[in-house]
């Protein structure tokens, strides 16, 4: 019996879309087509590949009026925020802009006797497994540079955002990217693991849960396939005694609550210097109490449902456990909270690191806030996590932030901002957040392999 993937809309629990998965044979055929197409694609001039990719990006922009409500139906983000095309375009445009530099050979010598250099070679076929929470922006992080670098791409998107890969493939094909060069595929987990174990890909890029990342690593074990993994997070914010409190509150609370807290680098715990704690908390409560929880198709809605009921159940369980253990919940249950996917955003105090809500990934609209006395105390708490994606520091002192950042176990250190992916900087993590890096020049290095040339010239 053919397995069918179903996107259950968090708006009302109905089946919004469904697609049959590829059989093992059909999946292998898709890989074979991609492999055959890759050499010709890589042989095209870099600028030609850039132009075709950017035409595909522009085509997505032309579809935005259709995409925005489609995203609301699939994963619950309110239409008032207008979708993801701004970040989608920014990331692709930057990678196009730096492609020549990022893919340029490293020239060692070109003299009378020797020519020595290192070139960048595409891996071949790249599998990109994208998540549902920012389905376009996370996908383009790998799709654009992989194609520009001369790889062919198979995109497997999350079931919750089932139509995104299909729409991206359509846009890129309409722009002139050959169909076998960029394929959207519907795969189940076992077929995906089988393909990886069979050395089908030169590189696998995955964004998602720690458990799924471990499954991918196990599938790739012994194949020597390159793997890039962006997994869980529990990103901290630290507000120092000299911080601009209002700016810190505005950014950190938005970082904790936007997209119903379903952000890879969302703020999940906040440490505030004790002298500012009451002020920070009061301003935070004012912001969250002003939110409207409701149907994401309505323009007045600030926070829509979480993408799936089971995600909301996890957040409720963490919150209830914390309250039982002595935490204080400050936000009264909102009228739109249905006990299912629609979840009241919550601020907790009297929390500590014995509570799951301060240790394990929540990936929802809840944040614990703790007072601290010093940088040393804040540093110990920030590093008391199995994850390491970003940390957000709030101070007037750049040197202090940079010095403290050097001691924080994380992939990115922000000062006076949060929850932003800068395409010029490598997007990376440490500890259980994963390994590898996307975007920036380093992103091109990860999507290619170095090839050395040591050419001795014939001399008389």
Image (spheres, rainbow, N blue to C red):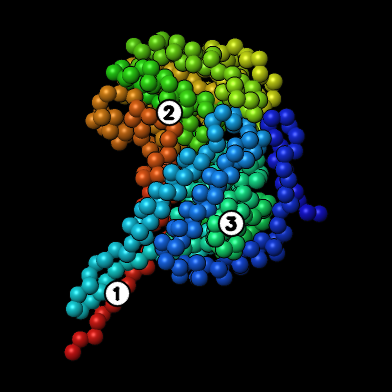
For label 3, the crowd category at 10 Å Cα-Cα, with few meaning under 14, some 14 to 19 and many 20 or more, is some
Name the foreground residue: 248 vs 3: 248
Instruction: Report the residue marked by disc 3.
Output: 174
Q: Residue furthest bottom?
A: 460
**Residue 227, position as x, y percentages in the image:** 49, 54
Of callouts 1 and 2, the N-terminal one: 2
Cα distance in 3D space between marks 2 and 3: 42 Å
Instruction: Report the residue marked by disc 1.
Output: 454
Helix, strand or loop for disc 2: strand
Residue 333 vs 121, above or below: the answer is above
**Residue 27, position as x, y percentages in the image:** 66, 61
Q: Left or right? Give the position of 170 relative to 279.
A: right
**Residue 357, position as x, y percentages in the image:** 53, 24
Instruction: Report the residue marked by disc 2.
Output: 236
Can residue 227 be seen in the rendering of this structure?
no
Can residue 369 be seen in the rendering of this structure?
yes
For label 1, the crowd category at 10 Å Cα-Cα, with few meaning under 14, some 14 to 19 and many 20 or more, is few
Please identify, in this view, whether the residue under mark 2 or under mark 3 is nearer the observer: 3
For label 2, the crowd category at 10 Å Cα-Cα, with few meaning under 14, some 14 to 19 and many 20 or more, is many
Q: Residue at x 75, y 34 (%)?
A: 14
**Residue 330, position as x, y percentages in the image:** 54, 12
| Rendering quarter of residue 1 | bottom right
Cα distance in 3D space between marks 1 and 3: 42 Å
Residue 111: which disc?
A: none
Question: Quick one: quadrant of the C terminus?
Answer: bottom left
| Rendering quarter of residue 344 | top right
Q: Left or right? Give the position of 195 relative to 414.
A: right
Cα distance in 3D space between marks 1 and 2: 48 Å
Of callouts 1 and 3, the N-terminal one: 3
Q: Residue at x 43, y 43 (%)?
A: 90
């Amino acid at each position: 019996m053919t397995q069918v993937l179903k996107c259950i809309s968090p708006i009302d629990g109905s089946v919004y879309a469904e697609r049959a998965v590829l059989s093992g044979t059909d999946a292998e055929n898709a890989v074979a087509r991609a492999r055959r197409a890759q050499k010709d694609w890589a042989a095209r001039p870099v600028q030609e590949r850039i132009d075709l990719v950017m035409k595909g990006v522009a085509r997505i922009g032309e579809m935005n009026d259709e995409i925005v409500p489609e995203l609301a139906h699939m994963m619950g983000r309110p239409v008032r925020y207008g979708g993801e095309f701004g970040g989608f375009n920014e990331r692709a445009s930057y990678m196009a802009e730096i492609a020549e530099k990022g893919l340029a050979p490293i020239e060692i010598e070109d003299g009378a006797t020797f020519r020595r250099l290192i070139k960048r070679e595409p891996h071949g076929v790249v599998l990109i497994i994208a998540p549902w929470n920012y389905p376009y922006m996370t996908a383009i992080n790998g799709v654009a540079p992989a194609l520009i670098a001369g790889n062919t791409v198979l995109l497997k998107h999350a079931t919750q955002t089932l139509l995104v890969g299909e729409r991206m493939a359509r846009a890129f094909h309409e722009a002139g990217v050959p169909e076998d060069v960029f394929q959207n595929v519907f795969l189940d987990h076992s077929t995906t693991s089988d393909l990886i174990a069979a050395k089908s890909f030169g590189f696998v890029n995955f964004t998602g849960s720690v458990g799924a990342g471990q499954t991918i690593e196990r599938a790739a074990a012994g194949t020597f396939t390159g793997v890039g993994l962006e997994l869980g997070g529990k990103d901290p914010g630290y507000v120092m005694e000299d911080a601009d409190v209002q700016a810190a509150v505005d950014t950190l609370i938005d970082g904790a609550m936007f997209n119903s807290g379903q952000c890879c680098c969302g703020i999940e715990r906040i440490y505030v210097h004790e002298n500012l704690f009451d002020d920070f908390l009061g301003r935070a409560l004012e912001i969250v109490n002003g939110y409207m929880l409701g149907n994401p198709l309505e323009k007045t809605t600030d926070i829509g449902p979480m993408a799936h009921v089971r995600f909301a159940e996890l957040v409720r369980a963490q919150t209830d456990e914390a309250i039982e253990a002595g935490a204080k919940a400050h936000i009264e249950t909102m009228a739109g909270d249905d006990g299912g996917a629609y979840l009241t955003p919550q601020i907790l105090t009297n929390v500590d690191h014995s509570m799951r809500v301060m240790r394990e990934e929540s990936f929802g609209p809840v944040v614990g806030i703790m007072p601290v006395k010093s940088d040393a105390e804040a540093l110990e708490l920030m590093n008391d996590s199995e994850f390491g994606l970003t940390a957000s520091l709030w101070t007037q002192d750049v040197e202090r932030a940079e010095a403290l950042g050097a001691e924080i176990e994380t992939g990115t250190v922000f000062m006076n901002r949060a929850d932003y992916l800068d395409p010029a900087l490598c997007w990376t993590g440490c500890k259980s957040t994963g390994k590898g890096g996307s975007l920036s020049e380093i992103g091109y290095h990860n999507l290619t392999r170095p090839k050395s040339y040591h050419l001795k010239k014939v001399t008389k």
